[in-house]
Image (cartoon, rainbow, N blue to C red):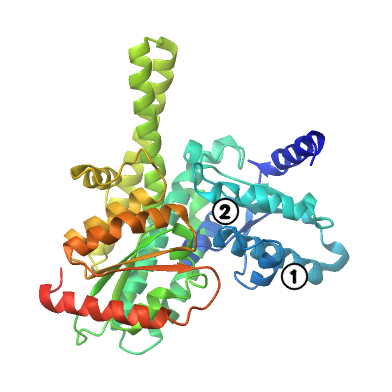
Amino acid sequence: MNKVQQLDTFRVISEGVGRFDVQGKTCLIPEMNRIGCHLLAGVFHGFGINATVMDTYKGLDLGKEFTSGKECFPCVVTLGDILQFMKTEKERLGNRFNPENYMYFMPESSGPCRFGMYNKYHRIVLDSLPGLDKLKITSLTAEDDYALDGLIPQEKLQGFYKAGYLSVVIGDILDRLLWRIRPYEKNTGIADTFINQAMEQMRESFAHYAGEKNFSGILNDLVHIVEQGKDIIDPQVPRKPLIAVVGEIYLRSHLKSNQDTIRTLEGYGAEVINASIGEWVNYITYDQVRLAKTALRLNVRKFHLKAVRESLLKYLKYNLKLFYQYVVQRKVYRLVNTYIDIRGDHKIGHLEKALKTDNTFSFDIGTEACLSISSALEHAHQGYDGIVNIFPFTCMPSNLTSSIAKPLMAKLNVPYIDVSYDGSYQPGREAALRTFMYQAYQHFNTNGRP
């Protein structure tokens, strides 16, 4: 490829990926965390924006067709999802199909994680297919704490942000409600049926109340669901070993990509809690606070007054935002915990201190390894009976997590297992998870329930 072709490719990517206004379009949301994505779609609807969560994993063969196998597995899955959706829409609408009527929503992150390149690569693939070059990719980035500027009108930004964050928290709680009740359900299958209905109810609740900023109405609907969920638990079933899941955010959240590892562990007698999406959102904001604080110190030393002012304003802005997120998260979890015991999240600052205690790792390195290593340590100290690290095959941050967390867990005598996925079915997976659960039961019987 010569320089002209390279410049043309960069131009196409910059023009086809960015913060585009989603009003008047159908916003296509890839499914990662199943419940949370549907609640987010409800938020979009509440603000008058048509949004749909795409069917997932049905286009995996398409994703593999346009990738080499060296890419991060979530990139393959999400590419297959958008290609399959557009193919299905074209077959359904025929001559009425117009890719410009859609907006593909694919956020990104910075740093060494390949997530930052998904939408760029997707752009290149879409541009190679007739007509799909007209489909724009709208994106948010972790570099500015997923700011919403450009997606919706300025006057709606604050309301959308508050409703969106609340949908993340409630999505986490519905997940944790399922994981709390399913291992103890009175009749097999009723917890899954219940949570599917609950997801639809809360999606409608966000669609109805979010645009009006009536968050009390949303919380009232949540309380009603939690009260119903509590009744599914059979009090005669004794508590089970408690397993914590950490790892790469997509794989640990996407049921089909991780072959429903949580359900498999439950089948071997576990109660499982997965790391939340809210934890990641809070981490991104916390990281902006850290960066602004570092910039402020450097600019004060250099006596750059204008830069000092800018850094201070950023520091205050992100601190206030993080404070608001913690207040909302704590309020909702406390509300739910008056009805049923759902475990909450750690504060990100506390997780950083946990790493600093023995100089285990540094938040300066970044990536999800910060959260996974520190969360594994905290769960171990809290008496959890095992740690599962779920990640895409070849994922650098998660392999880094493994290299540090595995010996730490061995030192603390807490069972630990790495489970990587690339779309293939490994014959030894079931045996490995079964063996892990045998060790977790030994830990549980020796130490009791936290």
Residue type highlighted by circle 1? Thr
State whether residue 388 is above or below residue 280: below
Q: Quadrant of residue 3?
A: top right
Residue 428 left/right relative to 71: left
Q: At which x and y percent is residue 50?
A: 64, 56
* Badge 2 amino acid: Phe
In the image, residue 231 above or below residue 55: below
Extreme-right residue of the structure = 95
**SS at mark 1?**
helix
User: What residue is drawn where x is 40% and y is 82%?
Assistant: 430
Can residue 335 be seen here?
A: no
Residue found 82% across the figure and 62% down from its top: 97
In the image, what residue occupies the spot 42% across and 61% down? 171
Mark 2: secondary structure: helix
Query: Image quadrant for the N terminus?
Result: top right
- Using the image, tell me which numbered label, if any, was put on residue 10: none
Q: Residues within 10 Å of mark 1 (few under 14, many from 20)?
A: few
Residue 317: horizontal and vertical position, in percent? 39, 30
Q: Which residue lies under the disc numbered 1?
A: 88
Q: Is residue 154 left or right of residue 125?
A: left
Viewer-nearest residue: 283 or 71:
71
Q: Is residue 46 left or right of residue 18?
A: left
Q: Is residue 133 visible?
A: yes
Mark closer to the chain start, 1 or 2: 2
The picture places residue 335, in percent across and down from the top left corner, at 27, 59
Residue 268, located in which quarter of the rendered image?
Answer: bottom left
Residue at which label 2 appears: 44
Screen quadrant of the C terminus = bottom left
